Amino acid sequence: MLNRFFSVADELAQRHGCEKIKTIGGLRDGGAGLPDPIFQPRRDARSLALDLRGAMEREAFGGCALR
């Protein structure tokens, strides 16, 4: 389940121009506007978070939807 989550998170981060900084257990740390400054890092980070939440709501583990 975590492998799928991180694969989706990596793909979405790349799509939104965000950068993964590190992963510790089930925690993902990242940022927008790194390493190169971008125009709207907060907008991109917010869009990434909303898309990731939507993607995970469509996933299931052991037949149960993730919430």
Image: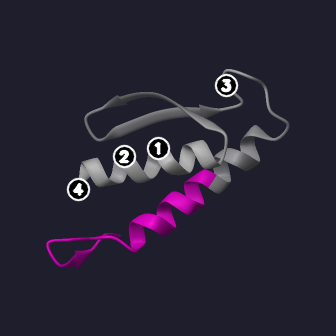
Which residue is label 4 attached to?
A: 1
Q: Residues within 10 Å of mark 2 (few under 14, many from 20)?
A: some
Please say if the residues under marks 3 and 1 sit with CB atoms less than 8 Å apart.
no
Q: Amino acid at mark 1?
A: Asp
Which residue is label 1 attached to?
A: 10
How far apart, in angstroms, are the residues tagged by discs 2 and 1?
Answer: 6 Å
Task: Identify the residue at image location x=78%, y=25%.
Answer: 37
Which residue is label 2 attached to?
A: 6
**N-terminal label among 3 and 1:** 1
Please say if the residues under marks 1 and 4 sit with CB atoms less than 8 Å apart.
no
How far apart, in angstroms, are the residues tagged by discs 4 and 2?
Answer: 9 Å
Q: Read off the magenta span.
A: 48-67
Which residue is label 3 attached to?
A: 34
Q: How is the image coloured?
A: one colour
How far apart, in angstroms, are the residues tagged by discs 3 and 1?
Answer: 15 Å
How far apart, in angstroms, are the residues tagged by discs 3 and 4?
Answer: 28 Å
Please say if the residues under marks 2 and 1 sit with CB atoms less than 8 Å apart.
yes
Q: Amino acid at mark 3?
A: Leu
Q: Is residue 60 above or below residue 11?
A: below
Tag count in the figure? Answer: 4
Residue 5 coordinates in the image, percent (x, y): 34, 53
Q: Is residue 49 above or below residue 56?
A: above
**N-terminal label among 2 and 3:** 2
Task: Identify the residue at image location x=25%, y=35%.
Answer: 25
Task: Identify the residue at image location x=31%, y=69%.
Answer: 66
Q: Amino acid at mark 2?
A: Phe
Q: Residues within 10 Å of mark 3 (few under 14, many from 20)?
A: some
The quarter holding residue 4 reads bottom left
The quarter holding residue 18 reads top right
Q: Amino acid at mark 4?
A: Met
Quadrant where the C terminus sits is bottom left
